[in-house]
Image (cartoon, helix red, strand yellow):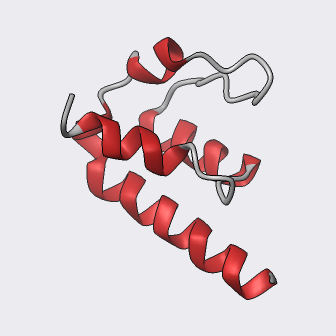
Amino acid sequence: MTEVLPLVYGLAKPSIMERHWLEICDIFKTEIPYNKETFCLRDLLTVKLLDKREDLEDIADSADKQLKLEN
């Protein structure tokens, strides 16, 4: 869990938008219900986050940079 929680935290940032979730779903080749109102951590943990750690970190970093540029 010490390796998974930072990834979950990164994906929970306000900078993560729908387009990022679509990219994540594409990476894992599965549907992850990412609706903010009904999102459940269990749904995210069904995929093997650590298998794509670098991709997820890149997405979270990119989302933060995009948000900074927009503001």
Q: Is residue 38 left or right of residue 50?
A: right
Q: Is residue 18 left or right of residue 21?
A: right
**Residue 70: percent from left, percent from top:** 80, 82
Residue at 60 percent of width and 23 percent of height: 31
**Residue 38: percent from left, percent from top:** 75, 16
Q: Quadrant of residue 3?
A: top left
Closer to us: 70 or 19 = 70
Q: Quadrant of residue 67?
A: bottom right
**Residue 2: percent from left, percent from top:** 19, 36
Closer to us: 11 or 33 = 11
Q: Quadrant of residue 27?
A: top left
Q: Is residue 41 left or right of residue 56?
A: right
Q: Split into 4 quadrants, where in the image is the N terminus? A: top left
Residue at 65 percent of width and 44 percent of height: 22
Residue farthest along the left direction in this orientation: 2
Closer to us: 24 or 61 = 61
Residue at 80 percent of width and 83 percent of height: 71
